Image (cartoon, coloured by chain):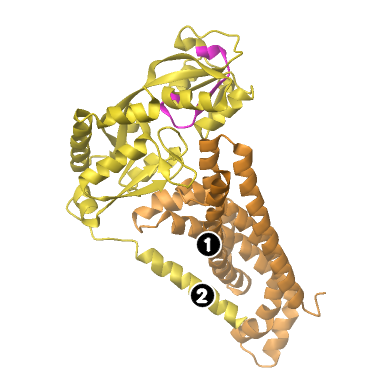
Amino acid sequence: MFSNFVSYIIQGTAITVAVTLVALPFGLVIGLLMALLHTYGGKAINRLAAAYSLLMRGVPPIVLLFILYFILSGEINLSPFWAGSLSLGIVSSAYQMEILRGALLAVGGGQMTAARAVGMSRLQAIRYIVLPQALRIAIPPWSNEASIVLKDSSLVYALGVPEILRRAQQLSATTQQPFLAFGTAALIYFVLVFATNRGLDYLSERTKLPTHP
Amino acid sequence: MKRILVVVSLLVVASLVLTACGGAPKAANHLEAIKQAGVIKVGTSADYPPFESVDANGNKVGFDIELMTEIAKRLGVKLEWVDMPFDSLIAAVQEGKIDASISAFNYSEERDQTIDFSDAYYTSEDAFTVADGFAGTIAKPEDVAAYKVGVQTGTTQDTWLTDLVNAGTLPEANLFRYDRADQAMADLKNGRIEVVMSDKVPAEALAKQLGGLKIAYSGVLSSGPMNIVIPNGDVELQKAINEIIKQLQDEGFIDQLAVKYFAE
């Protein structure tokens, strides 16, 4: 019976991973766009991007999750999975934006000036000179964000997405063995986060810049 | 780099497309829409045995589960369970995320303002559960105000106890709210609280399962009839479900279920 229960929790792993795989790239795309706008946009765009970051980082993910799912979804019929994953992505985008902004600034203004001096347009300079360096620099802090999103994916249980935590709760209620249920959940999360971080460490090592040892 | 960008943008596009496909054309009324779709989406919080829980294989089991399965069968539609925490259920019905919800809901005026109820399918009592070594006495329900009391958030028992707090008899600091009933019972067993107020049937089940707990008092205080939650003003669905509940009561189906799950 217990092995059945444990396998029931493990089945939730696929959902947890899927939520993360939607939220993280979604947040990366928005975050990167916002970081570029914040760094290279005009005054008004700059302020707008800064306000976005401030607002999204100032709201607990679970609150945003409920707003998107229960209030906004009158217009678009989002399933719990998509509502949960996309809201997590939006929350994460603000943090990823700050990580990427830091990385863009770390490349330094001199490179942009030099690129312009050899006749590149601003867009070309961003695309071929600044971004390739900035993305590499961003990997180590970004791996922090990846593990945070992975762990925050447990929040979607509140919308009824049967991921690891929700399954552990159900089993705790049925078996009255909270330690077994939540211990299993903890172990799975740990393995997932550990694997993610090691993978990103490897990527970071492989793509390291000679100028940023 | 390029490949990563391609993968990322594909994921985003896929997510947007899948999101956009969610909508469906509107039917004349909700009941028609359910019949057109051939599926009724019913919410429950499967962490409240014996009303609703999951078994070793992850299947939903319990009194409400079996009852709703029969109701869906008689409506002539498939049943799709949507599991979510208890206090998200009413909002989900309100927002049309689910068609109805069965989760040992008791009628209350507060709830009735935002959603509607079916007729009662079962009548429940409240119980005060205590540890075997409990030294106090609960002769009448209000006596509970002298102890540290645990309750599940969003339940009618929560409302009943909150009234005691508002009346000034139960100190706010002595009311402990839990996400789920079994957490409250576990804390009771660990001695962190002295009394748990809940529905009687699950209280008996949990007391038996955990051991060392007993029911000190029971009676109809906050609970009473249990009803299925349906969207506000949805008279067609309400009528259809009420007719089926009536049939099931007349046929003795519900009594049999009660014997099976509550050993009455």
In the figure, what tint was chain B given? Answer: yellow
Mark seen at residue B9: 2
For the colour orange, the matching chain is: A
On whether residue B223 falls in the magenta region, the answer is: no
- Residue at the (56%, 60%) spot, across then down: A17
Find out whether the residues at labels 1 and 2 contact each other: C-beta distance under 8 Å.
no
The mark total stands at 2
Q: Name above or below for residue A54 compared with residue B189.
A: below
Q: Name above or below for residue A80 compared with residue A102.
A: above
How many neighbours does mark 2 have within 10 angstroms: few (below 14), some (14-19), or many (20 or more)? some
Residue nearest the viewer, comparing B145 with B254: B254
Spatial CA span between label 1 and label 2: 16 Å
Numbered disc 2: what chain? Answer: B
Q: From where the camera sits, is residue B241 visible? A: yes
Instruction: Tell whether A84 sits left or right of B114.
Output: right
Q: Dot 2 lies on which element? A: helix
Pick out the residue farthest to the right.
Answer: A213
Amino acid type of the residue that numbered disc 2 sits on in the rendered structure:
Ser
- Residue at the (64%, 25%) spot, across then down: B190
Instruction: Tell whether B24 sits left or right of A125.
Output: left
Q: Dot 1 lies on which element? A: helix
Mark seen at residue B3: none
Q: Position of residue A134 (x, y in %)?
A: 69, 75
Which segment did they paint magenta? B144-157
Give the quarter of the figure containing the N terminus of chain B.
Answer: bottom right
Mark seen at residue A18: 1
Q: Position of residue B131 (x, y in %)?
A: 58, 18
Judge if badges 1 and 2 mark residues of a common chain. Answer: no
Give the quarter of the figure containing the C terminus of chain B.
Answer: top left
Amino acid type of the residue that numbered disc 1 sits on in the rendered structure:
Ala
Which quadrant of the figure has residue A16?
A: bottom right
Q: Position of residue A79 (x, y in %)?
A: 40, 56
